[in-house]
Amino acid sequence: MAGKIKNCPVCGKLYNEIGRKMCPDCFDKQTEKEDEVVAYVRENKGAKIPEIIEATGAPESLIKRLIREGRFEQIGIKMTYPCEKCGEPIIMGKLCQSCQDKIKKDLQHTQAKFVAANPAPKQEPAAQSKGKGMYSLKRS
Ligand SMILES: [Zn+2]
Ligand SMILES: [Zn+2]
């Protein structure tokens, strides 16, 4: 196997990269930690992320990744983490759906403002008034 020799980002040791982001030692340790987190959540249903961090010493990023990977769903537990903006429980990405929608809307608003500040030369008036009030938000 032709792997590259790299420095492990966790412990700094040189290792032969074979499709892994860290050395075998750290990979094993991480796998152990993941199992520990999953086991902890199985035994402490409803545990919140800060509790899990305190109990297992696992970094938040690891727990979030396990949530995204559906590791807790596999054991029949719905785990979430808070939206970075409003704190709503989510299982993917960084923001909840409504914050994502809001950002999208703000962006459209900014774009609309830009268009208003830079009007295209000579537009048919119909094209300007059209759409106002007829615009309906599609909920996904
Ligand atoms: Zn390492
Ligand atoms: Zn949110």
Image (spheres, rainbow, N blue to C red):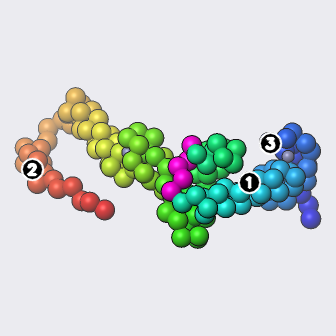
Q: Residue at x 80, y 42 (%)?
A: 10
Q: Which tag is nearer the camera, tag 3 or tag 1? A: 1
Q: Residue at x 84, y 44 (%)?
A: 8
Mark 3 sits on what residue?
10
- Residue 33: give its label: 1
Measure the alpha-carbon separation of dots 2 and 3. 55 Å
Q: Residue at x 24, y 33 (%)?
A: 113
Mark 2 secondary-structure assignment: loop
Majority SS type along the magenta span: loop
Q: Could you tell me residue 59's position as x and y percent?
A: 66, 44
Q: Earlier in the sequence, mark 2 or mark 3?
A: 3
Q: Could you tell me residue 115's position as x and y percent?
A: 24, 36
Q: Are marks 2 and 3 in contact (CB under 8 Å)?
A: no
Q: Residues within 10 Å of mark 2 (few under 14, many from 20)?
A: few
In terms of depth relative to the viewer, which is nearer, 132 or 63?
63
Q: Residues within 10 Å of mark 3 (few under 14, many from 20)?
A: few
Quadrant of the image for the N terminus? bottom right
User: Given the image, on which type of amino acid does mark 2 rest?
Assistant: Gly
Residue 104 appears anywhere in the view? no
Mark 3 secondary-structure assignment: loop
Question: With 81 as the anchor, is 125 left or right in this view?
Answer: left
Q: Which tag is nearer the camera, tag 1 or tag 2? A: 1
Mark 2 sits on what residue?
133
The quadrant where residue 86 appears: top left
- Residue 59: give its label: none
